[in-house]
Structures are given as structure tokens and as C-alpha cells.
Amino acid sequence: MKIGFIGLGNMGAPMAQNLARGGHSVTGYDTATISLQGVGSASSATEAVDGAEVVVTMLPNGDILRRVAAEIIPAMQKGAVFLDCSTVDVDSARAVAEMARDAGLLPLDAPVSGGVGGAQGGTLTFMVGGDEDGFEKAKPLFDIMGQKAVHCGASGNGQAAKICNNMILGITMIGTCEAFALADKLGLDRQAMFDVVSTSSGSSWSMNTYCPAPGVGPKSPADNDYKPGFAADLMLKDLRLSQAAAETADADTPLGAAAMALYAAFVEEEDGAGRDFSAMLPRFSGRGRGS
């Protein structure tokens, strides 16, 4: 396919390169000057989408997505797939999908899970909202960029799935870090804690796969001085999206709200900016009950 790719940052660049390695003709554009092997370079977003059968966007937030969409949709050919892989608010995803559909395009919102490592390795999971026709047309691209793509229903449902998943992740990571900090103060060895919980009813992805305790369980960012695999800043972004959606939907999410407040303090008032989201463990370990 002829593919336009807009947004060549830490996630977008390896995704675009994987598509090129998969035999597709990829033309990329980013506001920063970026040169990628196998990927053509456009001087503007509209040039990147000219004649493309699929346009992929990977952008920082909903406002930027709306602006880029307004710019590129008139330049896209009818019947093309507009595949947005950004993580944005549900309202922006649905508004952009409506704009695209009105222009005769096939819009998909397809945020990803798997981080930079998944983008580089082509092992991302895509949560996809939009029409079945668009999903089927884009499926060969999902197979190159990732290991799984789940069609979640109507436009916006991909974003809904992503923020619900990451709300769970934020909550469970905090619970896991709190439990390790408590175990420390009770004199329970961290390895013993992991061996019990990882095979008991307290097990979770945060414990079993991404353990926040260094030297315990599979290798994780905790073993690399909490250099981010998934930054606390990004977790805060996703938790804020979940709470904005909860406000709009009138959903009661007290633990999601509490997780958002804790990550906001960690990132904006403490030392969490630029650290992995599992660095909540040293945060809790260094605090007492009244801190």
C-alpha cells in the first residue's frame, strides 16, 4: 500500500519503519526534521497524505489531532483509511472520525499498548474503533506493526478501551508498590513477597510481568534505575483522560481519581517526571503513614 505517516516520534518512527520493511511505500512527516531509513520524507502533512491509501497519525494529544485532521482530510483521497494511533480523549477521536466519514474516508481510532519496545519489535496491541470495512483494510498493517488488533466497535471505542485498560494499570501499579513498601516495613523479604503474590490471588501484570522491585521477577525498568519503559508522565496523561471521560459519562471512578491525584503529585511536585511509572515504589518506600 501507499501509506502516509504523520508523527515520527519515539513511537511513530519505528512503526513507520516496520511498515516500510514490510514492503509498503511509506512517506513520513514530522514537525521535527527526521530521516528514517526506508521511509520517504515529505515537506508537509498534506504532501505526506497525497494519494495515500492509508494515513497513519501518531500525535501527542487531541487538540493536535484535531488540527492535523482539519489540515489533511481535504487532501486525502476518498475511500482512504484514516488510522489514528494516538492516545487522545474520546470526544476528539469521535469528532475527527465524523469529519473523516463526512469526507468519504474510513476513520479508525487505534491507540496502542506495548510502549517503545513494542513499536520497535512490531509487537504492539491495537485497540480499534471504527467501521468493519476500515478495520479489514488496515488489518495487514496491524499484523506488521503489532501482535494483536482488537476491533472494539464504533468510533471512539478504541480510545475508550485504552483509557479503561490504563486506568486499571495505574491503580494496580500503585497497589503493588504500596504492598511492597508495607512488606518492607513488616520485615518481609521482597523475593518472598513476589513468590507468594505472583502465584496467588494478588497477582497482576504489574506484579508478574513489570515488577516494580529491582532484582525481583522478570527484568523490568526497576532493574535499570527506573528509566522509563512507560513514563509516569504518560500514565498521568492517560489517567487524566480516563477521569475526563468518567466526568462526561457520569461514571463513579474513585480509585481512578485517586490514582490520578497520586501520579499528579509524583510527576508535578516530586521527582517522578521522566521516570518509569513503577518508580512509585521508592516513593512509597521513603514515606511514612503521615507523609
Image: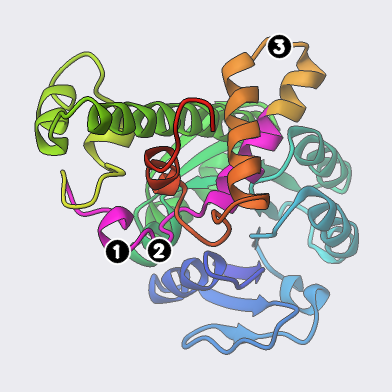
Residue drawn at (15%, 28%) of the image? 188
Give the residue pinned by disc 3.
Answer: 251
Looking at the image, is mark 3 or mark 2 nearer the viewer?
Answer: 2
Residue 197: percent from left, percent from top:
18, 23
The amino acid sitting under disc 2 is Lys
Q: Residue 227 carries which label?
A: 2
Q: Which is nearer the eye, 186 or 130?
A: 186
Give the residue pinned by disc 1.
Answer: 224
Question: Marks 1/3: CA distance?
Answer: 37 Å
User: Does the image show residue 158?
Assistant: no
Q: In this rendering, is residue 131 above or below 153? A: below
Badge 1: residue crowd in 10 Å (few <14, some 14–19, many ≥20): few
Q: Which is nearer the eye, 86 or 25?
A: 86
User: Mark 3 vs mark 2: which is more N-terminal?
Assistant: 2
Name the image quarter holding the C terminus.
Answer: top right
Looking at the image, is mark 1 or mark 3 nearer the viewer?
Answer: 1
Q: Which mark is residue 124?
A: none
Question: Marks 1/2: CA distance?
Answer: 6 Å
The amino acid sitting under disc 1 is Asn
